[in-house]
Amino acid sequence: MDKDIDKPLDGWRLRLYTIIFEADTVAGRRFDQALIGLILLSVTVVVLDSVATLQERAGTLFDVLEWLFTLIFTAEYVLRLLCVRRPVTYALSFYGIIDLVSVLPTYMALLVPEAHFFIDVRILRLMRVFRIFKLTGYVSEYNALGRALVASRRKIMVFLSFVLMVVLIMGTVMYVVEGPANGYTSIPTAMYWAVTTMTTVGFGDITPKTDLGRLISSLMMILGWGVLAVPTGIVTTELAMQRPTFGRPTTRTCQRCLTEGHPPEANYCLRCGAELPEWQHD
């Protein structure tokens, strides 16, 4: 049975796979563009449905549209499972889980009673807004950004640990300098002030009253400008390193592991080594 599932695609499955998973053909581009439009429309409906006045006037219309979007996305999910070599691999992948989560809330809302001891159905309805994550499967720049974040995760963790150390030290200093009389009732409260000051948000609910405290706040704000620029530089450098050094990147997707982005001249998958089918493009 596993051998049948893993057999190379041909016939209608190959044609469907090329349209759904690759966008270097006219049909593939149109499919992706139509799906992006549907995703944006469905998220817009969810957002508008949360407005009480609009829900009272057009609640029935919103419900009809939501079921229409749900049925379309359900059909898309089923077609994706039918045209891949390993349906389970796709179902357990990031995009497979996103596709499933994008349709589950509508069906779950039918099954979950609105009793007081159950989660409010409105929470399930709001989960539909996560369909916006389906967009990441159709824009290659999302994948490049994701790879850059993964590649720079160690540097970002080191940076965050440094920020936490500064917040802890400066929060403790302000707790000593200002004290409970000026609103710094504990070190955690003073750390909250340090976070809002370093990020240049400054809610104003806790402010220093002494001259020394104001001097420390000024230094924290200036430090915040420089600190916030660090992760931007890290990610930007990684993004620059993500540029391909050979060939033009395409939407060619490995039929075995579903890795995409292979250049036109590639013969084997860059991740699992499986042989790639002939590149189909227009």
Image (spheres, rainbow, N blue to C red):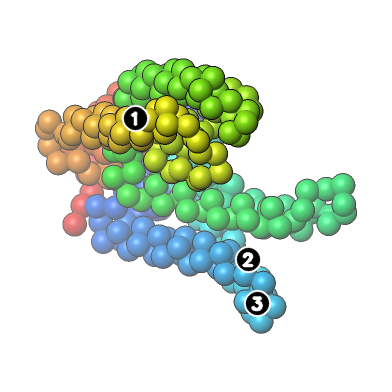
For marks 1 and 2, give the CA distance.
43 Å
Q: Residue at x 54, y 51 (%)?
A: 130
Q: Secondary structure at mark 2?
A: loop
How many other residues sit within 10 Å of disc 2, few (<14), some (14-19) or many (≥20)?
A: some
Of badges 1 and 3, nearer the viewer stands 1
Q: Give residue 228's quadrant in the image.
A: top left
Q: Residue at x 39, y 47 (%)?
A: 137
- Residue 227 x, y percent position in the rendering: 32, 30
233 left or right of 246 in image: right
Q: Is residue 80 above or below residue 209?
A: below
Residue found farthest to the bottom: 57
For marks 3 and 2, give the CA distance.
9 Å
Reading the chain from its start, which is encountered first: label 1 or label 3?
3
208 left or right of 138 in image: right
Q: Nearer the viewer, residue 3 or 177?
A: 177
Residue type (three-letter) at the residue carrying disc 2: Ser
How many other residues sit within 10 Å of disc 3, few (<14), some (14-19) or many (≥20)?
A: few
Q: Give residue 223's quadrant in the image.
A: top left
- Residue beneath label 1, please? 219
- Residue beneath label 3, please? 53
Q: Nearer the viewer, residue 71 or 80?
A: 71
Asked whether the beta carbons under mark 1 and mark 2 sit within 8 Å of each other, the answer is no
Residue type (three-letter) at the residue carrying disc 1: Leu
Q: Residue at x 31, y 34 (%)?
A: 222
Circle number at residue 50 = 2
Q: Secondary structure at mark 3?
A: helix
- Residue 170 x, y percent position in the rendering: 45, 22
Q: Is residue 118 something one can see in this rendering? A: yes
